[in-house]
């Protein structure tokens, strides 16, 4: 979604089909007010979904 804006409230599905066998990812989000949120070493295969509120 780099460069795109998701209106609030909104929802988007991101598929991580990059061919890697490792399911650990880092997520970085920038909010409309300029604040950032970062979360590291997430096993997305095990989690199934990730929600920002």
Image (tube, rainbow, N blue to C red):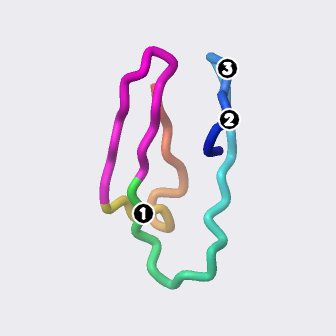
Q: Quadrant of residue 10?
A: top right
Q: Which residue is mark 2?
A: 4
Q: In the structure shown, which secondary structural element does the residue marked by tag 2 occupy? A: loop
Q: CA distance from mark 3 to mark 2?
A: 10 Å
Question: First in sequence: mark 1 or mark 3?
Answer: 3
Vertical placement of 10 versus 48: above or below?
above
Q: Which residue is mark 3?
A: 7
Q: In the structure shown, which secondary structural element does the residue marked by tag 1 occupy? A: strand
Is residue 28 rendered to the left or right of residue 5? left
Vertical placement of 52 versus 38: above or below?
above
Which mark, by number, is residue 37?
none
Magenta includes 35? yes
Rendered residue at 35%/35% (across/down): 37
Circles 3 and 2 in contact, beta carbons < 8 Å:
no
Rendered residue at 46%/32% (across/down): 30
Q: Which residue is mark 1?
A: 25
Q: In the structure shown, which secondary structural element does the residue marked by tag 3 occupy? A: loop
Question: First in sequence: mark 1 or mark 2?
Answer: 2
Magenta includes 31? yes
Range shown magenta? 27-40
Residue 17 in picture, x, y percent from top left: 66, 71
Rendered residue at 40%/68% (across/down): 24
Q: Residues within 10 Å of mark 1 (few under 14, many from 20)?
A: some
Q: CA distance from mark 1 to mark 3?
A: 24 Å
């Amino acid at each position: 979604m780099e460069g795109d804006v998701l209106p609030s409230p909104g929802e988007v599905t991101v598929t991580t089909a990059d061919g890697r066998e490792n399911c650990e990812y880092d997520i970085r989000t920038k909010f409309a007010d300029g604040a950032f949120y970062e979360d590291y070493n997430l096993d997305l295969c095990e989690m199934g979904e990730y929600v920002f509120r």
